[in-house]
Amino acid sequence: MQAPDEGHGREEDRELLVAAVREAGRIALTYYQTKLKTWMKGSDSIVTEADIAVNDQLYRDLALARPGYGWLSEETEDDMVRLSRTRVWVVDPIDGTRAFAKGKPHFVISVALVEDGRPVLAALFNPATDEFFEAVTGGGATLNGEPIRVGDRAVIEGARMAAHAPMFKHPAWPEPWPEMEIIERNSVAYRIALVACNAADAALALNTKNDWDLAAADLVLNEAGGLLTSHDGKVLIYNRELPRHRSLLAAGPKLHEALMARVGLLTLPA
């Protein structure tokens, strides 16, 4: 008997994913730089009508087309049925909503297909800049159809770091950080994609992120020759009961090792 989440080939799923994410980008642009309806989710998370419209479209195009796959999205109530599924769509309809709401082009639509805890297909699309990142496990990563590769920087000083600048000035650091070029982007997934295409050298965050922030970007970076781990070097596993990660460190292998020497022994508050 065929399992409920089997029966579709990787290429079929890739074509479905790419078409859905491109359509999501088209929908997002109809709201971009317009007067948006917005509200707060929790104490500090903004949601816009565009997030919901894109989420609904992706659900129709992906979840309904693959009823045997699980679904995990920032804008859908979590359904623990996903834990029983081998394959799960992991979705952030708009990663970087604050930037999107302000009319800044620092956001992406982020979708991965996770299989047995790791992403196997990924698409990240910034429709405002027309940047479409795509990756297939074992098949490399591309930006607008062209192969991408991480840089080979090995030293922190002078690195282009995609991160929140005040983090590096915190008094708790035992020694000051060397001078770096800090690249601020509201979208975590976009920061990691910039590392993948060598527009940044590294990304670092020491606060909690969710599966939907990281899964697609993880595969894009990995297939571009980079590493995405927790700050202490652990590989990220997706589609767990609590789909969260305490930190992230993204870089090419040499710089990842140098950054691990500085942050790998940190004990972060629970």
Image: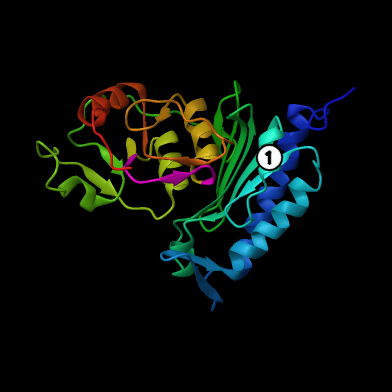
Tell me which colouring the rendered structure shows: rainbow
Q: In the displayed structure, does residue 102 sit left or right of residue 76?
A: left
Residue in the foreground of this view, choosing between 241 and 182: 241
Q: How many labels does the image show?
A: 1
* 195 vs 9: above or below: below
- Quadrant showing the C terminus: top left
Q: Residue at x 20, y 41 (%)?
A: 180
- Quadrant showing the N terminus: top right
For residue 224: magenta? no
* 70 vs 140: above or below: below
Q: Which residue is drawn at 41% across and 64% down?
A: 44
Residue in the foreground of this view, choosing between 229 and 243: 243
- Residue 203 occupies quadrant: top left
Q: In the rendered structure, which segment of residues is drawn in magenta?
A: 204-212
Image coordinates for residue 57, horizontal then vertical, percent: 72, 57
Q: What element carries label 1?
A: helix
Write down the residue under mark 1: 82
Q: Which residue is drawn at 81% across and 44% down?
A: 65
* 167 vs 235: above or below: below
Q: Which residue lies furthest to the bottom in this view?
A: 35
CA neighbours of label 1 inside 10 A, class few (<14), some (14 to 19), many (20+): some
- Residue 197 occupies quadrant: top left
Q: In the displayed structure, does residue 242 sit left or right of residue 18?
A: left
Image coordinates for residue 252, horizontal then vertical, percent: 36, 26
Q: In the rendered structure, which amino acid carries the disc numbered 1?
A: Arg
- Residue 76 occupies quadrant: bottom right
Image coordinates for residue 77, horizontal then vertical, percent: 64, 55
Q: In the displayed structure, does residue 39 sit left or right of residue 2?
A: left
Q: Which residue lies furthest to the left in this view?
A: 175
Image coordinates for residue 150, horizontal then vertical, percent: 40, 29
Q: Which residue lies furthest to the right in this view?
A: 1
